[in-house]
Amino acid sequence: MKSMHELLPIFGYDKFRPLQQEAIQALLNKQDVLLISPTGGGKSLVYQISAMMLDGVAIIVCPLLALMTQQVRMLKKWVLKQSF
């Protein structure tokens, strides 16, 4: 399994924004997380990286269609590069 730092470039970033890494770690530790940050603060990245690292199914609800479209495109590129 890849680490959260190895997954970060999939989304086009080389470092985490404030509180992202801590929130991801809390989710991986199966703790409840309430993350409040401004638009563009990186909330969806927290849930997506956590979902990629945990077993099972994750449902992510995001009202920003354009952001979701971009992230799906980046994930598809990542999946195509993986050798399963």
Image (tube, rainbow, N blue to C red):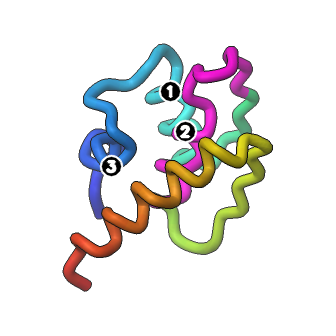
Task: Tell whether position 39 is magenta.
Answer: yes
Which of marks 1 and 3 precedes in the sequence? 3
The reply to whether the C-beta atoms of the residues labelled 2 and 1 are less than 8 Å apart is yes
Residue type for callout 1:
Gln
Dot 3, how many residues are within 10 Å of its Cα: few (below 14), some (14-19), or many (20+)? some
Q: Which mark is residue 20?
A: 1
Q: Position of residue 57 (x, y in %)?
A: 64, 72
Residue at image point 41% right, 67% down: 76
Question: What SS does tag 2 mark?
Answer: helix
The reply to whether the C-beta atoms of the residues labelled 3 and 2 are less than 8 Å apart is no
Task: Tell whether position 84 is magenta.
Answer: no
Provide the residue designation for mark 2: 46
Q: Nearer the viewer, residue 35 or 70?
A: 70
Q: Is residue 2 left or right of residue 33?
A: left
- Height in image: 34 above or below 52? above
Provide the residue designation for mark 3: 10
Question: What SS does tag 1 mark?
Answer: helix
